[in-house]
Amino acid sequence: MKKEKTVLVFGVFDLLHPGHGYFLKTAAKKGSLIVVVARDKAVFTLKGRKPDHSEKKRLTAVRAVSCVARAVLGDSVQGKYSAIKKYKPDIVCLGYDQIGLGKDIRARIRQGELKNMCIMTLPSHFPEKYRTSLVRNELKNK
C-alpha cells in the first residue's frame, strides 16, 4: 500500500475567504495537508502592518477547514522553515503570489539546508475578486 503524500502550505490566512478555500482544497487533493499559519510578527515584517486577526484566531479558522489535516503556527523568525524540517513534506504548494518564498525554498534545497521536495505553484482563484486586501476594503466600505 502506497503512503499518502504530505503536502505543506504557508500563508497568512487573514480574513479567510473563498480564494483561501480554493487554495487549501487544491493543495489537499495532492495529499495530507499541513498548513503553516504566519505569526503576527512575520506578517508585520512581510507586509508592514499587523493582520486584521491575531495568529491564534487565524490558526483556529484554518483548523476548522475540513480538508486541513493539521495547522500549525510558523516560525517567529522568517526563513527557519521549522515546519519543513519537522514534517518533511513531499510537496510544498505555493500560492500564485508567493514567488519570493518559492525562490528561497529552492535556494535552500540547492544549498542542502532543506531536503529535496516538489515545489509547485497553484493557480489562483479569481484574484481580482478574492484577495485579502480586496476583502478588507469591501468590509470597510460596508
Image (cartoon, grey):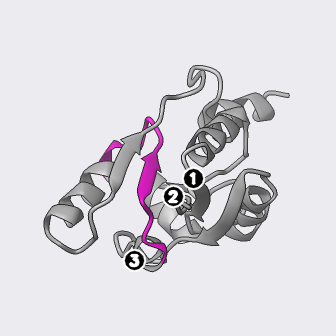
Q: Quadrant of the C terminus?
A: top right
Given the current orientation, which residue lies at the most extreme right position? 142
Name the amino acid type tagged 3: Lys
Residue 135 covered by magenta stretch: no
Of labels 3 and 1, earlier in sequence is: 1
Q: Is residue 53 visible?
A: no
Name the amino acid type tagged 2: Lys
Bin the neighbour count of mark 1 within 10 Å (Cα to Cα): few under 14, some 14-19, many 20 and up. some
Residue 91 covered by magenta stretch: yes
Name the amino acid type tagged 1: Gly
- Give the residue pinned by disc 2: 5
Q: Nearer the viewer, residue 59 or 25?
A: 25
- Name the residue: 60% across, 33% down: 131
State which region is magenta.
87-100
Q: Secondary structure at mark 3?
A: helix
- Name the residue: 32% across, 50% down: 102
Bin the neighbour count of mark 3 within 10 Å (Cα to Cα): few under 14, some 14-19, many 20 and up. few
- Give the residue pinned by disc 1: 31
- Left or right of 65: which side holds 91? left
Of labels 1 and 2, earlier in sequence is: 2
- Give the residue pinned by disc 3: 85
